[in-house]
Image (cartoon, helix red, strand yellow):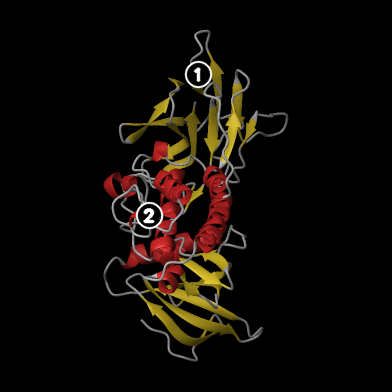
Amino acid sequence: MKLRQGKIIKGKYKIEREIYKGGMGIVYVCTDIYSRAYYVLKHPLFNGMNDSMKVDKLKVEANILSTLSHPNIVRYIDSFEESNVFYMVIEYIRGSDMKTLFMNKPTTETQAKNYCGQLLDALEYLHNQNIIHRDIKPRNVMIIRNTVKLIDFGGAKMRFTSLGNIGTILFTPGYGAPEQQQKGEYHFQSDIFSVGATMYFLLTGKDPCSPPLSPCRINPRVNRTIDLIIRKATDIDPNRRYQTVNEMKNALIGIYRARPAYNPRIIIGSREFKITKSPLTIGRGGVNVHPDIVINDPERYVSKVHARVFRDSQGSYWLEDCSVNGTFIYIGGMYRKITKWNLHDNDEIAFCWSPSKGAYMLLKFKT
């Protein structure tokens, strides 16, 4: 299926020209015949190979983008079905993708920090809404007048909305984190790996190879501090990477904060909550219910008080489930439901989990 030039979709979107055709779909520039505004229109490419999956991928992207509003994320316009075909309309970006601009043409450290800082701003926004992009790479970063725009959310994970869950391999060689490639695992730190790999590309003009990545090996002019930041971001072990987007942002602008070893915390997205009382309650709250850590959950899978963290007389920390939909710990490659759990450094916690949809809301315990 291919749309001809001049065809009008939904009575308003006029096809101007095709700009991309890939294995998943076809992308066009179109104009709104009433406002004369330019947009991008996408539809799946039907060729008998995984056609239903292609439709699902585009629906996931439309569903996620429709909830977002950020200057460094492509803007959602519309989505609809016509003649049994699903279409999505998004912002038309008059720029080029990062891969086209900088392949074999490395940029300066200042520019690389600027672009990756904007990318981290977008990820901070996403992670705080419990969204993991899972496919950060130069081809998915558009640049227009020195402004970054993150695109392609077809593989993103938002609560129970995603194309795949644990065990589904979603990654781009060189840019996808090792845990995505090897086990189909994903964490917020998986996106941080991909930003580090993207920064490596900007400073070398080359696609990454084996992590941890060191741009100094190809471009000796790269500042050693920047090299160390990229190596930390692309560590093979997600627990040794920056644990939040904010940590990497602060490193890039030269802010280093020593963290007391006795200060355990709960990480939710890019937010960190110190455990300064026992018990400490976590949930979405409600009328006359005020947990210590409030989670915004419009779908209400998270209970008003979903779990509590408490410290015993020996100084150990415990997680206790208080929910309707369950609290789970990631152990040995799978999520297991718990009633009470002795917490250890780097424990991955899920509020709600489904065997078909994966984790609903991810948290992490750090000491």
* Mark closer to the observer (2, 1): 2
20 or 299, nearer to the observer? 20
* Labelled disc at residue 247: none
Which residue does the image show at 33% across and 74% down from the upper left?
46
- The x and y percentages for residue 138 are 42, 64
Amino acid on which disc 2 is placed: Cys
364 or 249, nearer to the observer? 249
Amino acid on which disc 1 is placed: Tyr
Q: Marks 2 and 1, how far apart in space?
A: 41 Å
Residue on which disc 2 sits = 216
Mark 1 lies on a secondary structure that is strand
Rendered-image quadrant of the N terminus? bottom left
Res. 105 image quadrant? bottom left
Residue 263, above or below 79: above
Res. 279 in view: yes
Residue on which disc 1 sits = 317
Res. 219 image quadrant? bottom left
5 or 304, nearer to the observer? 5
Point out the residue furthest to the bottom here. 6
- The x and y percentages for residue 65 are 54, 61
- The x and y percentages for residue 185 are 35, 44
Disc with the residue nearer the chain's start (2 vs 1): 2
- The x and y percentages for residue 112 are 50, 61
What is the count of numbered marks? Answer: 2
Which residue does the image show at 56% across and 32% down from the upper left?
258
Which residue does the image show at 54% across and 61% down from the upper left?
110
Q: Residues within 10 Å of mark 1 (few under 14, many from 20)?
A: many
Mark 2 lies on a secondary structure that is helix
